[in-house]
Amino acid sequence: MFQTLLDMCSDMGMEKHNENNPFDCGTYFQGDGNTSKGYFWCLSHDSHFTITKCDFYFCKDTELTMPHNSRYISLRLEYAKHLPPGKITAYLEEAGNTVSRLMPAGSRVAYTEVLYDPAFYKRHLGTMFTAQNVNPLEILKHMGGEHNWSGEMMNVLTKINLCKLKGMAAELYYVAGAYALMSALIEMGNGRLPKKNTDYENILHVIRYIDEHYTEEIRQDELVRLASMSATKLKSLYRQFTGSTITEYILDKKADHASHLLADSDLTIEEISRQVGFNTVAGFSTSFKKRMGLSPSEYRKRIEFNCFINPSVDSFR
């Protein structure tokens, strides 16, 4: 995974400048002034995970590709792009899909991230520790749709971003932070597993169904049938496993989908409203604002503000 990041840095016009490394550890890149301006810093630990901090913008349209053999779990706190303050994004890429995206000139990228390699969460977590009552992979692989991240996870990512230590002290701090972040994630997910294995599988079945049909009308009797349990038990276990009610989960999925359409498409708000399954724009706007803190139109404007009008202006040091 570390090599993939290095290749992406090259594609982004990032050049190694370790002699100017303000963190005094890890690998430090600076934009070449032609493709990008700003910095990208990363620290890899035993091929288990990589900690990243970056803040840069693209000087010209640039296509980035994450190759199909990139498999990872990533927890990212973004400071630019279209996410509201305090939003953590989780990427759980187990299928190894190739992802390409065109970054327009002026697009700003700024985030703090811990990216975990499969060797860490599939083998390391499963063999190093004495408490193995629950397979950690079973917890992690179902957290990608999570919306209500714990405050502890937010605190860890923020502290990593603000760390002012240097050299070995900094490296130890970052590594400890990566373990603390995974600990908070495991703790959050551990309490949500249904006690019976059959219940666990049935809840997963319902979640997969909702993930595939959340833009459509979803009937409660169909979910009860899929879960093979009473409506009361389904609601209780669903909340235990996901941290939200079924309705909240569906509306969160709609809001996430809409946020990407607002960021990456020219569709009108009315068209986006229909695509994510709302009958009225008013209903869509109310639900979206409740979850994202901004109305769809305000949200789209914020995206534009994160794209510099004059990308030649050197705003990063």
Image (cartoon, rainbow, N blue to C red):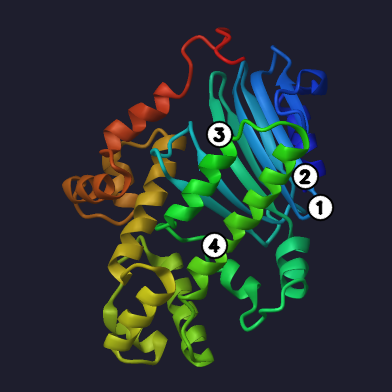
Mark 3 is surrounded, within 10 Å at the Cα level, by few (under 14), some (14 to 19) or many (20 or more) other residues, namely few
Question: Where residue 128 appears, x then y in whole percent?
Answer: 77, 71
- Residue 143 sits above or below residue 203 on the image: above
Mark 2 is surrounded, within 10 Å at the Cα level, by few (under 14), some (14 to 19) or many (20 or more) other residues, namely many
Question: Helix, strand, or loop for circle 4?
Answer: helix
Question: Where residue 198 appears, x then y in whole percent?
Answer: 50, 92
Q: Which mark is residue 44?
A: 2
Q: Residue at x 70, y 65 (%)?
A: 121
| Residue closest to the eye, 216 or 262 | 262
Question: Helix, strand, or loop for circle 3?
Answer: helix
Question: Helix, strand, or loop for circle 2?
Answer: strand
Q: Earlier in the sequence, mark 3 or mark 4?
A: 3
Q: Earlier in the sequence, mark 1 or mark 3?
A: 1
Side of 292 where 139 appears, left or right? right
Q: Quadrant of residue 243?
A: bottom left
Disc 4 and disc 2: Cα gap in Å? 20 Å
Side of 200 where 33 appears, left or right? right
Three-letter code, disc 1: Ser
Three-letter code, disc 2: Ser
Instruction: Kindly indicate whether the residue at mark 4 contacts the one at mark 1 (C-beta within 8 angstroms).
Output: no
Residue labelled with disc 3: 162
Instruction: Kindly indicate whether the residue at mark 2 contacts the one at mark 4 (C-beta within 8 angstroms).
Output: no
Residue labelled with disc 1: 47
Q: Nearer the viewer, mark 2 or mark 3?
A: 3
Three-letter code, disc 4: Leu
Disc 3 and disc 4: Cα gap in Å? 21 Å
Question: Helix, strand, or loop for circle 1?
Answer: loop
Q: Nearer the viewer, mark 3 or mark 4?
A: 3
